[in-house]
Image: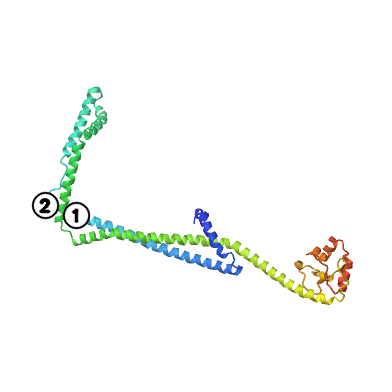
């Protein structure tokens, strides 16, 4: 397929519409669909091969029919030529001929004679080269004679045409063709319909082949664009898995938070283990000492209750980075957490 079709904007828009069908497919489903598209390409290629065979058969059939047509026309022509004199003799008929052929010859001779005479009078010393010089004026005179006698010539042509027409009609009426001649003529009359049907069949085959070639082009383009679709689907699935994992961790974190709250006995005089300030225990929040996004788990060893202010500051920072950023004593906090059975 040529680049003109490959880069055609209309085809590009058509493919874009077909791609919309696959935008929500999963990665595995896209792989299965890609395999299906490759199978469809093979089916279309086989279809094109079969169509080419049919087109070739039809072309060979047309060649055979055309050769047969020439053969039949030659036979009919030869039989007419052979039998026409016999038919004309039988009905005492003579083929019409131009009665003014002699006038034409006389016209040409007269034009040449006048031209030679004029050239001779004009340049008598040029003889016999004057014969060559006379050709130009002779052609001019012939043209003038034909122009002056145009109506008469036209009348003679019409007369000859009518006589020839009557002659052929009488010959046809008295012509006794052979059975082969009759059969051939009948076949020749049927040939235009046969040619017309063959032409329609051929046109249909060419259109089917064109449709298959177009479908192959579209399928190949789809397979190329499937690379992006598969990559996007893969990324979506990874994101979904991560989101699901984080959701599971959040559910687990809530369970651990409830256990941590129950483990605190003195809630009225509670100090945040990070900033070491007395805070309202009701606003305490569960923090992952080692952040979730860095592989931290929702376990009792990795989670601790801290104040909301520290939680909003720490976000996804590691404990060391958090202490450094907000100028807290990392060593003291680590000792305190280890005593509480936490992993630091």
**Disc 1 secondary structure class:** helix
Question: Closest to the observer: 114 or 35?
Answer: 35
- Image coordinates for residue 3, horizontal then vertical, percent: 51, 54
Of pointers 2 and 1, the one earlier in the residue sequence: 1
Task: Decide if residue 245 is on the left or right side of residue 191.
Answer: right
Q: CA distance from mark 2 to mark 1?
A: 14 Å
- The residue lying at 79 percent from left, 73 percent from top is 257
Question: Closest to the observer: 37 or 142?
Answer: 37
Q: Verify CB contact (< 8 Å) between mark 2 and mark 1.
A: no
- Image coordinates for residue 90, horizontal then vertical, percent: 10, 54
Give the image quarter of residue 303: bottom right
Question: Closest to the observer: 312 or 90?
Answer: 312
Give the image quarter of residue 86: bottom left
Task: Decide if residue 295 is on the left or right side of residue 88.
Answer: right
Give the image quarter of residue 126: top left
To which residue does mark 2 refer? 89
- The residue lying at 16 percent from left, 38 percent from top is 102
Which part of the image, by quadrant, shows the C terminus?
bottom right
- Image coordinates for residue 327, horizontal then vertical, percent: 87, 61
To which residue does mark 1 refer? 80
Task: Decide if residue 147 is on the left or right side of residue 271.
Answer: left
The crowd level at tag 2 (other Cα within 10 Å; few <14, some 14-19, many 20+) is few
Question: Closest to the observer: 76 or 323?
Answer: 323
The crowd level at tag 1 (other Cα within 10 Å; few <14, some 14-19, many 20+) is some
Label of residue 72 in the image: none
**Disc 2 secondary structure class:** helix
């Amino acid at each position: 397929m040529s680049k003109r079709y490959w880069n055609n904007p209309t085809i590009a828009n058509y493919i874009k519409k077909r791609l919309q069908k696959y935008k929500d497919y999963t990665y595995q489903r896209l792989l299965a669909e890609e395999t299906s598209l490759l199978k469809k390409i093979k089916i279309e290629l086989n279809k094109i091969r079969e169509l080419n065979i049919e087109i070739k058969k039809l072309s060979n059939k047309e060649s055979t029919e055309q050769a047969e047509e020439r053969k039949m026309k030659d036979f009919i022509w030869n039989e007419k030529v052979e039998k026409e004199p016999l038919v004309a003799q039988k009905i005492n008929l003579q083929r019409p001929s131009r009665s003014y052929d002699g006038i034409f010859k006389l016209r040409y001779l007269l034009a040449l004679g006048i031209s030679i005479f004029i050239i001779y009078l004009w340049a008598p010393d040029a003889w016999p080269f004057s014969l060559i010089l006379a050709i130009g004026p002779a052609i001019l005179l012939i043209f003038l004679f034909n122009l002056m006698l145009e109506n008469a010539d036209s009348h003679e042509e019409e007369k000859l045409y009518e006589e020839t027409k009557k002659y052929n009609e009488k010959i046809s009426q008295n012509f006794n063709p052979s059975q082969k001649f009759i059969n051939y003529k009948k076949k020749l009359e049927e040939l235009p319909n046969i040619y017309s049907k063959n032409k329609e069949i051929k046109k249909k085959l060419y259109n089917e082949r064109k449709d298959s070639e177009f479908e192959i082009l579209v399928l190949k383009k789809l397979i190329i664009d499937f690379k992006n679709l598969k990559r996007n689907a893969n990324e979506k699935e990874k994101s979904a898995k991560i989101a699901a994992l984080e959701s599971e961790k959040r559910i687990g974190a809530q369970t651990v938070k409830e256990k941590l709250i129950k483990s605190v006995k003195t809630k009225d005089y509670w100090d945040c283990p990070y900033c070491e300030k007395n805070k309202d225990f009701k606003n305490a929040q569960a923090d992952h000492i080692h952040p979730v996004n860095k592989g931290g788990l929702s376990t009792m060893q990795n989670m601790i209750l801290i104040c909301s202010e520290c939680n909003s500051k720490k976000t996804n920072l590691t404990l060391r980075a958090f202490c450094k950023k907000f100028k807290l004593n990392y060593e003291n906090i680590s000792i305190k957490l280890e005593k509480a059975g936490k992993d630091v």
